[in-house]
Image (spheres, helix red, strand yellow):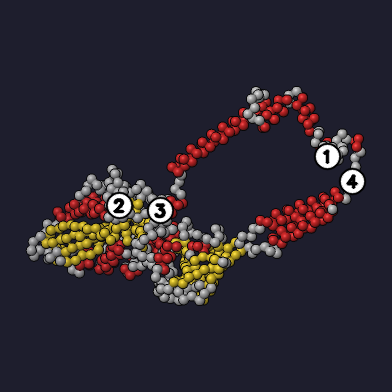
Amino acid sequence: MRFKISVALMVIGLLAIALGIAQRTVWAPPERASASYTAEGTAPVTVIEPEVFGVHEEEVDVSVEADGEFLMAIGRAGDVDAWVGEAAHTSLTGIEDGQLQGTVTEGEAKVPNPAGSDLWVSEEQGEGSMEHRWVAPADGEWSILLASDGDAPAPTNVTVTWPNDTSIPWSLALIILGALLVVLGVAMAVVSRRPNRQTPDNDSPGTGSGPGGGTGRQTVAGPATAPLAATDAAKPGRADEATTAGTGVENPEEGSRPSGRRSLMVRPALGLRAAAAAGTAVVLAAGATMPAQAAPSQEAEEAAGFPVVQESQLTRIMDSVAASVSEADKARDAGKLKPRVGGAALTVREANYTVRAENGKAQAPVPVAAGPILTSMVSTSEEWPRTVVTVTEGEDNPVPQVIVLTQQDPRSNYRMVGAMQMLPGTTFPQVSTEGGGTPAVPLDAEDGLLYSPQAAVKMVAENLDSGKHQGKIGKNTFSDQIQKIQKDQVKSNKSADISFRRSVDNKSLSALRTADGGAVVFGHIKSVTRSVPAESGATVELSPEFAALAGDDSTTEGVDVTYSEAVFLYVPPAESDETVNLVGVAQGLVDAKLK
């Protein structure tokens, strides 16, 4: 009977081993899983949503097949959606039942060519097919945009692959269990083949059919224990230990006085419990104070928003801006500026090119350095327009230069709207976060500031006009020079009445939060200097620069000369005893009009 059981155990064990090996070989799942979407698309844009990349934490490959050339661009999910806007597009939304799911949204049949957009953290051109290993550029949700040239249909044949879960937890257990069953079966077979030897009745005191009956080996094992314990307890020095072992475990409440050895065994147990209780108290205390000492969590950073531009994007944008400005300055062609320069900064350079065309000796505008970037402030606002501030320093402009960039809408690129040299003795305010991301500040509200951004720039304008707000505007070389020049002009021109008036271009304003709760504010101030003959019939002579813009070198009626004064200033937080400080300025001639 035992032999038959052993054979059955060995057979079952071998079957278990074979099944475990088969799960790891013949029936093993593939190393990589995949899901595809194949359709005849007509939309100009295809978007691979963030949910697709969540199929695996570390390794996702994207394969695209297309007819001809196409673009693969990577951007934040919200930025990609904003760029697509009302356009017709195919969205790949996730993986279900092993298939890549997609939906088609009707809309505009054509879009601008997305290549070269500042929204993309990276882009890659492909032809026919492309293999891409997905790596998220930074924290947050990211999408992939596929397009041809904006007119032709975008690629829609997409395959996503990722490492498959090849773990087979039961295979190893089956192999081990099978091996144990085989060993057990072999052991039973060996035992069943031995002859059954009987021991005589007088060989051992425990033989027979009584309570200690059985074979000699089995009979001795039971009764021998009690005499052994009694003998050990009778030995000197062992009684206390035996008593302690029995009392300390089975009856800890016993009223008899414990021996010395028993006391040594109990006290460590009590000490251990006390230490455990003390440890719990320490952990609870540390846990209660942890939130106050912990660094900001990723959730908190996400709530504050992510920088709208990554470092690689900013470097690429600044290279493009500086190249456009340099090329336009050399050619004196304002048309070359328009892709990368806007607002008053464009108007100032256009006027400079006009003046230099009439007067070759006129001073050229200050160059723009792409880098190195000394520091930057990047808005975290998901709305448009968006603002980015950089401080650069180059060979042609060794004085640090504050450059303000704005993006008006998702399909526009960033343009330089201000380039100001930092004033002597000034320090650029500390940015709000280590990554450079900082929230925008409402322009017409104080929002925790000493003054609202609009009010602060207006105060600066009034200070430049008449010296007003001296105690509220920090002393600076620009204000001192402007006020001195204006006084000298009035005194030296006896034949003309000269007046000055300034107004803030509120559309040019932007503000970003600083680390101390204050804000940096950028804006343009329109400065008009009016010169009118003091007496009827008198003539006001115009300088060559003014004449180039006015179209005449003199006037008997008067002339208005307009300057643009770009200012970058710091507004301290509310209840601060600091002043509003000018950090950087730039003044440029814009126009001259005869009355």
In whole angstroms, how far apart are the C-alphas of marks 4 and 3? 84 Å
Toward the viewer: 501 or 294? 294
Mark 4: amino acid: Asn
Mark 2: amino acid: Leu
Q: At 25% from the left edge and 63% from the top edge, which residue is drawn?
A: 590
Mark 1: amino acid: Gln
Q: Residue 157 got which mark?
A: none
Res 124 seen here: no
Which tag, 4 or 1, sits closer to the chain's start? 4
Identify residue for label 3. Answer: 304
Identify residue for label 2. Answer: 569
* Left or right: 101 in relation to 551: right
In whole angstroms, how far apart are the C-alphas of marks 4 and 1? 15 Å
Question: Residue 270, how many percent across, how many down?
Answer: 60, 30
Which tag, 2 or 3, sits closer to the chain's start? 3
Question: Residue 402, how many percent across, how many down?
Answer: 34, 55
Identify residue for label 1. Answer: 218
Identify residue for label 4. Answer: 196
In whole angstroms, how far apart are the C-alphas of marks 1 and 2? 97 Å
